[in-house]
Amino acid sequence: MIQDPASQAAQVRAAMAASIEKQRASIRVQAQAAGAPSAISLGIGPEPACSALSETELDQMIKETSQAEHVDAALVREVARQESGLRPCAVSPKGAEGLMQLMPAAQDQFQVSDPFDPKQSLAAGTRLLKQLLDRYHGDVSLALSAYNAGAGKVDKAGGIPDIPETQKYVETILGHLISHIP
C-alpha cells in the first residue's frame, strides 16, 4: 500500500519527535549524574514538555488519593504545585521526577513504576506526606521540611533546617494554604 506524502511526513515527524524526546531524557539524566544544573533551573531553558493537568482531572485525582491516605487535599495540591508546577513530566536538577517530584529512593519505596504517571506520583507523594505527618505528630511545617530536605536533616536540626530553599518551600506552601482558609 502506497501512502500519500502528507501521511508519510506525519509519520516521519512523529518518529523524530519520539527520538528527540529520548535524546533529551538521556541528556537530562547525564547532566544530573554529572551534577550540572538544568537549563530550566537556570531560567534559560524551555518549560517542561508537558502541560499542567486540567483542574478537573487534578481535583479528582487529589480527592481520591488524599481521602485514601487521610491527608488534606489542599496540602497535597500545594505540594504538587510547589514541586512541579502541576506538570507530570517535571524533572529537577537533583533527579526528582514527576508531579510530586519523587527521588528514585522514594519511587522504589512506594513501588512507583512510572514517576511521570500523575496518579502514581500523587499516590506515592501523598503516602510519603502521610508518613512524614505521622512521624512529626501532625506538624505540617516539619513534614514539609522533611519532604523537601529529608527527614534526617529535620531530625538533626530539631526543626526546620537552616536551608534557605527549605525555609522558602515551607513558607510558600503554608502561605498558600492559609490564604485558602475561610
Image (tube, helix red, strand yellow):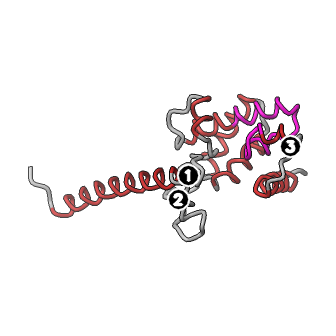
* Horizontal and vertical percent position of residue 107: 58, 35
Is 131 in the magenta? yes
Tell me the number on the disc at residue 157: 3
- 68 left or right, relative to 95: right
The disc labelled 2 sits on which kind of residue?
Pro
Q: Earlier in the sequence, mark 3 or mark 2?
A: 2
Predominant secondary structure, magenta span: helix
Residue closer to the observer: 66 or 162: 162
Tell me the number on the disc at residue 166: none
Tell me the number on the disc at residue 91: 1
Q: Which residue is mark 2?
A: 48
Q: Which residue is located at x 72 percent, y 47 percent?
A: 79
Q: Nearer the viewer, mark 2 or mark 1?
A: 1
Q: Earlier in the sequence, mark 3 or mark 1?
A: 1
Q: How many residues crowd around disc 3 within 10 Å: few (fewer than 14), some, or many (20 or more)?
A: few
Query: Marks 3 and 1, how far apart in space?
Result: 28 Å
Residue closer to the observer: 26 or 78: 26
